[in-house]
Image (cartoon, rainbow, N blue to C red):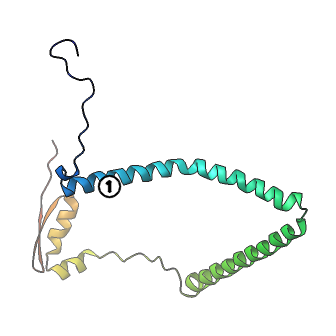
Amino acid sequence: MGKPGQRYPHAPIIDKRELKTPTRRMVEGSITAMLWAMWMYWILPVVTVVLWTVGIKMFYRSLLEKEQFLQLHLVLKNGGLMLLAIFFTNLIWINYNYYFIFRRLGTRRKGSRQCEDREFAAFYSIDEKILTQAKQHNRFEITLADKKITITSAVTTKK
């Protein structure tokens, strides 16, 4: 600080909580919480690998060193039987639904019937000729008012 005009290289930090508005404190706290959550999410795979390694060591110590293969075999057998029971229950349920829906009731994916021009014209009180002319030119204007539709066909000219 020997030369005139130079400032102190490090600005003093002033942290007065009463100068911040409640909204600013809430926003800053939310951002801080979100960043901590992101950091925890990013560090989670490392924690998982560490716990997985510890789990393998515990598995080795409890089953292989103590020679408790019979208990492991019993656990795998019961778990496998439960897995097969769940699989076959789902298979039976799927086949039942397939039979009931598609075989007995027919397909449920029936498409909706397209309305014919005369039905459309009769429902909206339109002249069929105007509707046919509009469909031929592929360009028309539809005006809705209450239950009445007005269709105006525009003839396109080729240049």
SS class, disc 1: helix
Question: Which percent across, then down, holds residue 152?
Answer: 10, 65
- Residue at left offset 25%, top offset 74%: 117
Nearer-the-camera pick, 106 or 4: 4
Report which quarter residue 112 is drawn in.
bottom left
Q: Look at mark 1 in the image and give the residue it sits on.
A: 30
Residue sticking out furthest to the left: 145
Q: Give the left or right position of residue 77, taking residue 5 as reference.
A: right
Nearer-the-camera pick, 155 or 89: 89
Report which quarter residue 129 is drawn in.
bottom left
Q: Give neighbour class at mark 1: few <14, some 14-19, many 20+ (Cα, 10 Å).
A: few
- Residue at left offset 22%, top offset 63%: 135
Question: Which percent across, then down, holds residue 28?
Answer: 28, 51
Residue sticking out furthest to the top: 3
User: In the rendered view of the protein, which quadrant contains the C terminus?
Assistant: top left
Question: Which percent across, then down, holds residue 41?
Answer: 49, 52
Residue type, mark 1 in image: Ser
Nearer-the-camera pick, 132 or 148: 148
User: In the rendered view of the protein, which quadrant contains the N terminus?
Assistant: top left
- Residue at left offset 70%, top offset 75%: 87
Question: Which percent across, then down, holds residue 76?
Answer: 81, 69
- Residue at left offset 78%, top offset 72%: 80
Number of marks present in the image shown: 1
Q: Give the left or right position of residue 106, taking residue 133 as reference.
A: right
Report which quarter residue 56 is drawn in.
bottom right
